[in-house]
Amino acid sequence: MFLCFDIGGTNIKSCLTAVDGKCLDNISVRTPETYEEILHVLNTIAKQFGQFDACAVAVPGTCSPESGEILFCPNLTCLNKRNIRDDLEDQLNKPVFVENDANLAALGEYYYVEKDNINNMIFLTIGTGLGGGAILNGELLSSDISLFEAGHVNIEPDGRQCGCGKRGCLETYASIGGIIKTYESLSNGKKVDNVNTIYNAMKAGDKIATLTFEVFGGSLGIGMATLANILVPKKIKIGGGISELADAFLPHTIKVFSRNIYPAYKSRVQIEVSTLKNSAGLYGCSALCKTKLGL
């Protein structure tokens, strides 16, 4: 059995899985503000689950899978420069593997949904931020540093300030925060608490809310085309919390994508909502444990 953690900016999701990826038990808690509290939560959950053979942790930032150090995590800065692998191994006395959360979401979606169908795939997780992972020739694109920071391709020179320190990143337009900023800008500063408020307004016919999702969908389409022009995947799949609202933006995303992708690639790339949706990262943790242990 494998202990799987997906650390997000808002929640920590956890699951105890069988070797075949089946979730046997799960717990979700709010993400604490300090690194020490996060470690305490992970250790407490591990004790609640009981026996397991290995643990994998999906982290919301750039990390070194080889050393276990988290190098840069703009949306959860308490993790910066921490070695969560070594610290957890000391507490759990089991092998611990660490990877970027979007990379593991890509691995989970591929390993448990697409492995028998395609060899090349891009996966985008859209929530607090925008992350990405890529599968090339049936393998997760990886190195000594986690790769494929899709949310930080530039789509608007000198555009919005991003948490990474740059301006105009895709993430600043195609994320929860990006949607809210767009709505507030289009509505002359009207404040909203969450994306669901904007989504419900769109469903009720609100023109500003409708335009907000059109702007979001267009930004996402441009970002997708940029990535597809480089890797030419068979599929681009969308996961994360925003994937649940796909009816509000996906048709426009596909139109903008089709206008911006290199013509020779247009008919080769399908865009779909993830099958595993917001659970893809946990499935990826399970797949990582399985492959690392050679099972």
Image: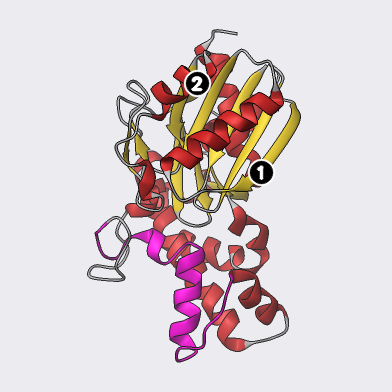
Q: Quadrant of residue 17?
A: top right
What's the residue at 53%, 25% (across, down)? 56
The earlier-in-sequence mark between 1 and 2 is: 1
Horizontal placement of 154 versus 181: left or right?
left
Residue name at image x 54 percent, y 81 percent: 211
Outermost residue toward the right? 24
Amino acid type, callout 2: Gln
The residue located at (60%, 80%) in the rendering is 210
The residue depicted at 59 percent of the width and 71 percent of the height is 194
The amino acid marked with disc number 1 is Ser
Q: Nearer the viewer, residue 288 or 5?
A: 5
Residue to which mark 1 is pinned: 28
Residues shaded magenta? 165-194
266 vs 211, nearest the viewer: 211
Per the image, label 1 sits on a secondary structure element best described as strand
In front here: 295 or 255? 295
Q: Which residue is mark 2?
A: 91
- Look at the image and say whether residue 178 sits in the magenta stretch: yes
Frontmost of labels 1 and 2 is: 2
